[in-house]
Image: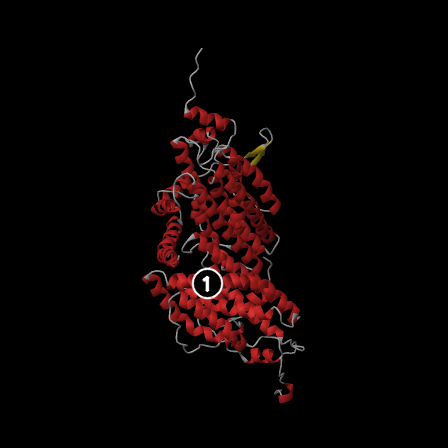
Amino acid sequence: METLAPTPEEQFQARIDADIRIEPKDWMPEAYRKTLIRQISQHAHSELVGMLPEGNWITRAPSLKRKSILLAKVQDEAGHGLYLYSAAETLGTSREQMLADLHSGKAKYSSIFNYPTLSWADMGCVGWLVDGAAILNQVPLCRTSYGPYARAMVRVCKEESFHQRQGFEIMQTLCEGAPAQKEMAQEALNRWWWPTLMMFGPKDSESPNTEQSMKWRIKRFTNDELRQKFVDMMVPQAEFLGLTVPDEKVKWNEERQAYDFGEVNWEEFWAVVKGNGLCNHERLQARVQAHEEGAWVREAALAHAGKRKARETVAA
Amino acid sequence: MAATQSEIPTAPAAAPAANPLFPLVLQLADTSLILAHRLSEWCGHGPVLEQDLALANIALDLLGEARSYYQYAAELEGQGRTEDDLAYLRSAVEYRNPLLVEQPNGDFAHTIVRQFLFDNFHYHLLKELQSGPDARLAAIAEKSVKEAAYHLKWSSEWLIRLGDGTPESRQHLDKAIATLWRFAGELTTPTALETNLQELGLLPEYAALLPAMQAHAAHVLAEATVPLPAAPFAQQGGKSGRHSEHLGYLLAELQYLQRTYPGLTW
């Protein structure tokens, strides 16, 4: 009996199912390429925009050591942005195009950065909770099907775990400090808890792309699975710090061997996604402004390199 | 009872045999900290991602250098003050950085010119300090001179790119030179304290640094196709605690948490 030769799509899926990495020159479905470009560039933009809320406290860090750690951390984020833009470029887009999409509002970045950083304890919460959530999202991506993305994520994740530790350490120092410091820590947790739960995205029932992304192995756990993992990880840590998670419904469920918790305010989630968070405007504006004010600098570098090359050609 | 002449203390009681190196090390610390602080203001706002990284790198190097100096200064003083007490609990008039480093970032050209003027001095100073008689200062200088060499390379290359780039970048550069060149002179004009230390052999003679500094500046400016700026009136004062208006705001921000919540651990 004659068997039909497998289609390119079938061969592609067979490689994925066998956990063989897809590399830039391999054939891939257009939808896979587009989805990856969207996902990786969104991640890169998040690193870039994510520099702003923490950058907000570099000049006010309370000790030279903290200042140095925070600056190094934000610098790491710039580095992550670079790896990720490079990974996305292997799919046939350019950094310029990706930035244009960010600046026009077409491309998204993580909504968490549209919340303001109002006290020093926010530097603790961003590291402990936001980077904690990011790690849960990102660790599975070290095994994602697209090679350059997976390799970039290995580097990113190594640094992220250091970031999370420094965030926790800021919280711990505050919680062991004066009453005013502990209050500062609790107040920040009250503000950051729910927005970090939102970082895992909409409920599975409202996340239409999840199934295809799981099939392509560019996503390895569903949004709700990761959200549950996060709550299970963080509630005991908050207890250890002597802080209270701002959700009365948080309760250990013996049967499920997991914490029950309340419902995220999805109205707020969608409002921020759609651009109505407190800082959406400022964050994007800051990026656009840096880009526009940097235009003459980038042009000068190009022009000078051109002149230099021309002179070398003449000399040779 | 009215105090008689002899009852008025002539010097603070707690100043036993002040080490002459203490104010110098503090001045070096303030200088590196203030410039690091300014550079850190760029974080997230650079003209291109790679330069955001470079600016943060230089800021981190200078911050690390400042911390080494502050820690040493605290030991030299021997009054139980820490690096953070020295950085966070001194007022603007007590700060001893030269005026140049407290000048605002301005646009990228201003940042580059400020950096170039500083790096050209800093690198040549550290080169000498690393073989100086004070072992601790020499060790800090030996570590920092490698970083300073990279800083100088970076700021020199950018000065050349901006000067010999586009007409627009040249305009930006010319403006920055006109604004900042007047602060260069203070770096190499010794104060009474510095003269004293130079006489003690603890600090290199600035006059001896000048030929190499001038040669490098002339080379870079020529590459940048920028005529050597006429020596403007050299503004002085920062190293003696007489600062521009900018420093007060910088310190208000830098010291905000320590001043709001005195005596806490962070």
The residue most toward the front is A316
Residue at (43, 63) in percent of width and height: B112
Q: Quadrant of the N terminus of chain A?
A: top left
Determine which quarter of the picture holds residue B202.
bottom right
Colour mapping: secondary structure
Residue under label 1, please give it. B155
Q: Is residue B19 left or right of residue B39?
A: right
- Foreground of the two, B129 or A265: B129
Callout 1: helix, strand or loop? Answer: helix
Residue at (59, 28) in percent of width and height: A255
- Up/down of B130 relative to B56, above or below: below
- Up/down of A178 relative to B80, above or below: above
- Up/down of A203 relative to B44, above or below: above
Residue A58: give x, y in percent of width and height. 50, 57
The residue most toward the top is A1
Residue at (50, 26) in percent of width and height: A17
In this orientation, does residue B236 appear?
Answer: yes
> Disc 1: which chain?
B
Residue A98: give x, y in percent of width and height. 38, 44
Q: Residues within 10 Å of mark 1 (few under 14, many from 20)?
A: many
Q: Is residue A82 left or right of residue B65?
A: left
Q: How many marks?
A: 1
- Up/down of A219 relative to A2, above or below: below
- Foreground of the two, A61 or B167: B167
Residue A296: give x, y in percent of width and height. 35, 58
Residue A148: give x, y in percent of width and height. 48, 39
Which residue type does callout 1 highlight? Ser
Residue at (55, 62) in percent of width and height: B258
- Foreground of the two, A128 or B60: B60
Q: Quadrant of the C terminus of chain A?
A: bottom left
In this orientation, does residue A261 appear?
Answer: no
- Foreground of the two, A129 or A214: A214
